[in-house]
């Protein structure tokens, strides 16, 4: 009941509530991208030679590429020379406790609802807060340290665990993978690194809050999560960004590696600034996310709720290499006003008896375009592969669009692949039923949409599920006339 | 080497273009020039082309193709009799390598039927009104080339309120020439308001030699008109076909199509529907059984451009041996096309470890008050059903054949022409028999 009241409260706030800019001194690089930029970033972070070399290779490869054109989203040509590729909150000394953190910064976190304090500890969440591009504070380090879990920023991982980083970085998403992966590999500023050793079940849910703050700063995060044999981790990623008029580019890379019998559960709630009612501003979210089920009986599960960003363009994927491995993808993508989304997943079945499941729910309203694009590929060796995909679209209003592009490629006769998709609008009889019982149309729509997304929301960790429900309602506000 | 052969083919196109007698169908010259220039600029598609992602056309072009000059051919009717399905129940039209032979064809009361060139002269106004006017998609290499170079083909015109009493059987026989020919042909079918027509078009190879057929058919169905269009492709294992069918439906019209592909090295079908006015109904059925090294590619595109229309698509595939198939079904519901119901289903079974299927059902929807769905499955025969049959003394191969033909029945039972249906059932049984020897 209390949740319902909160939902109603949030419904009445129509403006993007996370729109504010924190005034902190930034150490920014002049806009533009050259080999020097790459060298500067690497030097600033005191990176070893091999990483610089890797970045430079990526940069040189990127120069040979052109922006892809197959996507079902439209945006003006991005001038990479206008983007600031590095921006870090000024901080020279390494901090040991929260007291040392810039109070201005802490306030921002509080406004965002991320309090690095007791509350979070009680709820069992360790937060590695990424403010712009550098991790400034990491909590629960010790508790994790006890069980041998490494959870730190990428720069730190490069310094303290270079062998692990060297072994796994780029092993799932090589810099040759695509345009934005190449760009990210060249200029990634920071990110999170997580390593769960053999047999360890991570005692708490790990969480990173990303936040784009500095104007004109492209964010190039790099996340790498490795789960060794029989390990388990649930990782949460949530995003908010302040209101800005200029489009901002976010091209992150997330790599997951699971070995024998291990499992990674990766959940995302993405609520970046979607632009105003006229489609002005907003974030470009072009992310490459991929997991590799290397070991047998391993499992990767992606759950995402995408309500923000002017453009969302990403396909969290799973390569099912190990025999009997499982890949899952649960997604809710909401677009309103002039938002565009082209999202979905890829399930590549390589090993025997691999299984994958795709549940995608798209909701489009206003003048938005919402696309599901997914690939299920069963290679010759993958006997006994099994896939089930379901992608439903809900249309609200006659000016939006919903599109489905599933690619099914089967090369093995023992595979079973099923795909189904439906498109419809909210049933008038359902609305009528609610209205008749004194529930107004706006609330009824929120109710029906939440029911429609239940299959996906059920897979989110509890705290996220609550937030996601609120987000859904807020995102669709005003879309019912 | 490959490029050399292709250049030879291209040079033939250029030569044919330069020698094309401009006085054959002069009013088409502008459109033809457009087509030719498009082809010269873009060339044949490659695997990088989204629409040709899974069909390697380059390898099909890798042969010493000779552009068909459409010389007149002496035919002994007794040689071709065996290909006719039923001359009593159907009217017969004969096409040899895409060229219409009226002397061996039936006179059909109510319909105006002639060759493309004759139609240009006799029905000039009608011809110009429809020819190349409503292709759903912009040119691709094959439609562009066809527009530029096709001089032969069939013209069928059914005037207002005319119902053709019997189905028309169009027999396409290919490969009469000595060489391996590359043929362009073009058909134009116009059904005026409240008229009805049933077509049954089947293609066979006459001899052992290979043919490459690039055929474009345009069909216009007027208000309250009705068209049944059944096609069967059964050519030899060296022959290639690129078959583009464009159907445009006016208000309250009905169109049923079935597309059965049983033979050919590389067969590509593009079936495009445009529903330009309200209350149209379209049914698309398809069945493909590639075996050996055959590759069958079905692309369908239903363009719901106006409200209150209904479309239903059902395609099934059975892949055997090293057979590969592609299904790409696209439905677009345009802005304002409210109350659209569009359904699509594609089911496949793979019967061998070397068989392959790539299926891609697509929905693009720009209106909200619609009901659309698509489904695609890939699987194999039910083990339990196999066991059930075997436990009752039916041999494994026979049980296989039984289950496969049952799978195919779903599509076949949608065909209303009983003679044709029986003919198909026999063909499929024959093809399966060679796979599963008892």
Image (cartoon, coloured by chain):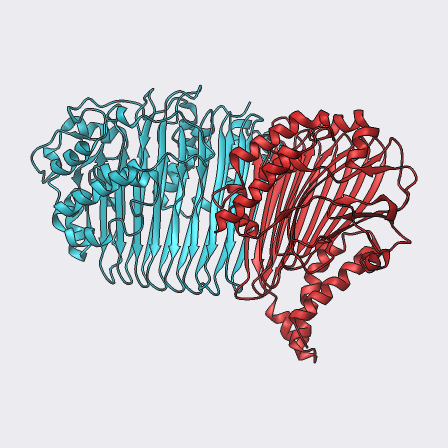
User: In this orientation, which residue lies closer to the viewer: A140 or A43?
Assistant: A43
Task: Report the residue that reaches farthest toward the left.
Answer: A93
The image shows residue A79, relative to residue A93, as above or below, that is: above
- Residue at the spot 63% in from the left edge and 34% down from the top edge: B17
Q: In this rendering, would A394 be left or right of A215?
A: right
User: In this orientation, which residue lies closer to the viewer: A117 or A25?
Assistant: A25
Q: In this rendering, would A253 be left or right of A391?
A: left
The image shows residue B387, relative to residue B199, as above or below, that is: below
Quadrant containing the N terminus of chain A is: top left
Q: How many marks?
A: 0
User: In this orientation, which residue lies closer to the viewer: B10 or A1?
Assistant: B10
> Looking at the picture, how far across and down is residue B294, in whole percent?
60, 58
Query: Could one spot residue B417 in this view of the protein?
Result: yes
The image shows residue B306, relative to residue B314, as above or below, that is: above
Q: Which chain does cyan denote in the image?
A: A
Q: Colour of chain B?
A: red
- Residue at the spot 76% in from the left edge and 59% down from the top edge: B424
> Looking at the picture, how far across and down is residue B178, in whole percent?
69, 55
Quadrant containing the C terminus of chain A is: top right
> Looking at the picture, how far across and down is residue A227, in whole percent?
27, 56
> Looking at the picture, how far across and down is residue B142, in whole percent?
61, 40
**Res B423 quadrant in image:** bottom right
Q: In this rendering, would A336 be left or right of B232?
A: left
**Res B209 quadrant in image:** bottom right
Query: Could one spot residue A446 in this view of the protein?
Result: no
């Amino acid at each position: 009941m209390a949740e319902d009241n909160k939902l109603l409260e949030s419904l009445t706030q129509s403006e993007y509530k996370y729109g504010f800019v924190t005034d902190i001194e930034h150490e920014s690089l002049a806009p533009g991208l050259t080999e020097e930029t790459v060298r500067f970033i690497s030097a600033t972070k005191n990176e070893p030679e091999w990483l610089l070399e890797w970045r430079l290779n990526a940069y040189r490869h990127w120069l040979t590429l052109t922006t892809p054109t197959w996507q079902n989203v439209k945006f003006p040509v991005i001038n990479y020379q206008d983007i600031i590729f590095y921006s870090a909150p000024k901080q020279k000394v390494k901090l040991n406790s929260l007291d040392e953190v810039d109070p201005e910064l802490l306030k921002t976190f509080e406004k965002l609802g991320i309090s690095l304090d007791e509350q979070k500890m009680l709820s069992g969440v360790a937060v590695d807060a990424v403010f712009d591009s550098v991790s400034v504070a990491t909590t629960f380090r010790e508790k994790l340290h006890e069980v041998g879990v490494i959870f730190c920023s990428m720069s730190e991982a490069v310094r303290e665990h270079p062998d692990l980083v060297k072994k796994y970085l780029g092993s799932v998403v090589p810099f040759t993978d695509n345009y934005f992966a190449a760009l990210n590999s060249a200029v990634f500023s920071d990110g999170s690194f997580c390593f769960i050793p053999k047999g360890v079940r991570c005692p708490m849910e790990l969480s990173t809050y990303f936040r784009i703050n500095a104007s004109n700063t492209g964010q190039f995060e790099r996340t790498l999560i490795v789960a060794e044999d029989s390990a388990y981790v649930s990782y949460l990623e949530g995003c908010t960004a302040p209101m800005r008029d200029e489009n901002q580019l976010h091209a992150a890379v997330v790599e997951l590696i699971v070995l024998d019998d291990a499992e990674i559960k990766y959940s995302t709630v993405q609520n970046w600034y979607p632009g105003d009612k006229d489609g002005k501003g907003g974030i470009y979210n072009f992310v490459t996310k991929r997991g590799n089920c290397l070991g047998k009986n391993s499992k990767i599960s992606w759950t995402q709720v995408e309500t923000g960003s002017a453009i969302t363009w990403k396909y969290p994927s799973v390569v099912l290499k190990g025999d009997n491995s499982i890949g899952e993808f649960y997604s809710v993508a909401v677009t309103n006003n002039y938002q565009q989304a082209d999202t979905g997943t890829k399930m590549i079945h390589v090993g025997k008896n691999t299984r994958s499941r795709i549940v995608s729910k798209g909701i489009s309203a206003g003048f938005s375009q919402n696309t599901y694009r997914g690939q299920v590929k069963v290679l010759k060796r993958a006997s006994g592969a099994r896939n089930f995909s379901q992608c439903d679209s809900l249309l609200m209003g006659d000016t939006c669009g919903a599109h489905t592009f599933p690619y099914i490629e089967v090369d093995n006769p023992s595979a079973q692949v099923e795909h189904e998709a439906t498109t419809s609008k909210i049933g008038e009889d359902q609305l009528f039923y609610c209205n008749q019982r004194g529930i107004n149309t706006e609330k009824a729509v929120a109710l029906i949409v939440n029911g429609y997304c239940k299959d996906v929301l059920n897979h989110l960790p509890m705290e996220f599920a609550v937030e996601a429900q609120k987000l859904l309602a807020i995102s669709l506000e005003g879309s019912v006339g | 080497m490959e490029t050399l052969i292709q250049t030879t083919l291209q040079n033939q196109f250029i030569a044919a273009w330069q020698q094309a007698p401009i006085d054959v169908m002069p009013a088409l010259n502008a459109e033809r020039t457009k087509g030719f220039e498009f082809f010269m600029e873009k060339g044949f598609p490659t695997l990088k082309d989204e629409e040709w992602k899974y069909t390697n056309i380059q390898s099909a072009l890798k042969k010493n193709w000779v552009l068909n000059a459409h010389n007149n051919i002496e035919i002994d009717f007794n040689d071709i009799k065996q290909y006719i399905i039923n001359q009593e129940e159907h009217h017969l039209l004969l096409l040899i390598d895409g060229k219409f032979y009226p002397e061996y064809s039936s006179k059909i009361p109510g319909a105006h039927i002639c060759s493309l060139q004759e139609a240009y002269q006799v029905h000039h106004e009608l011809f110009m009104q429809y020819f190349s006017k409503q292709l759903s998609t912009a040119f691709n290499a094959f439609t562009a080339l066809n527009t530029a170079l096709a001089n032969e083909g069939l013209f069928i015109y059914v005037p207002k309120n005319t119902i053709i009493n019997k189905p028309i059987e169009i027999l396409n026989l290919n490969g009469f020439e000595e060489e391996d020919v590359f043929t362009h042909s073009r058909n134009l079918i116009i059904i005026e308001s409240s008229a009805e027509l049933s077509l049954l078009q089947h293609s066979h190879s006459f001899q052992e030699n290979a043919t490459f057929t690039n055929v474009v058919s345009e069909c216009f169905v007027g208000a309250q008109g009705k068209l049944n269009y059944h096609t069967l492709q059964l050519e030899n294992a060296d022959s290639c076909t690129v078959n583009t069918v464009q159907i445009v439906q006016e208000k309250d019209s009905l169109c049923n199509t079935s597309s059965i592909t049983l033979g050919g090295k590389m067969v590509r079908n593009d079936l495009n529907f445009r529903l330009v006015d309200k209350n149209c109904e379209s049914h698309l059925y398809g069945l493909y059984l590639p075996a050996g090294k055959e590759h069958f590619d079905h692309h369908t595109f239903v363009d719901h451009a106006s409200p209150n229309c209904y479309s239903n698509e059902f395609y099934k595939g059975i892949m055997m041996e090293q057979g590969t198939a592609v299904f790409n079904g696209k439905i677009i519901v345009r802005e304002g096309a409210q109350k659209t119901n569009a359904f699509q289903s594609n089911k496949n079974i793979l019967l061998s470890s070397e068989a392959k299927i790539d299926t891609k059902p697509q929905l693009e929807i720009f209106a909200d008050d619609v009901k659309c769905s698509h489904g695609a499955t890939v699987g194999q025969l039910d083990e339990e059903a196999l066991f059930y049959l075997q436990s009752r003394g039916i041999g494994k191969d026979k049980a296989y054949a039984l289950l496969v033909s049952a799978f195919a029945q779903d599509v076949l039972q949608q065909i209303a022409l009983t003679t044709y249906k029986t003919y198909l059932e026999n063909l499929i049984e024959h093809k399966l028999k060679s796979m599963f020897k008892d």
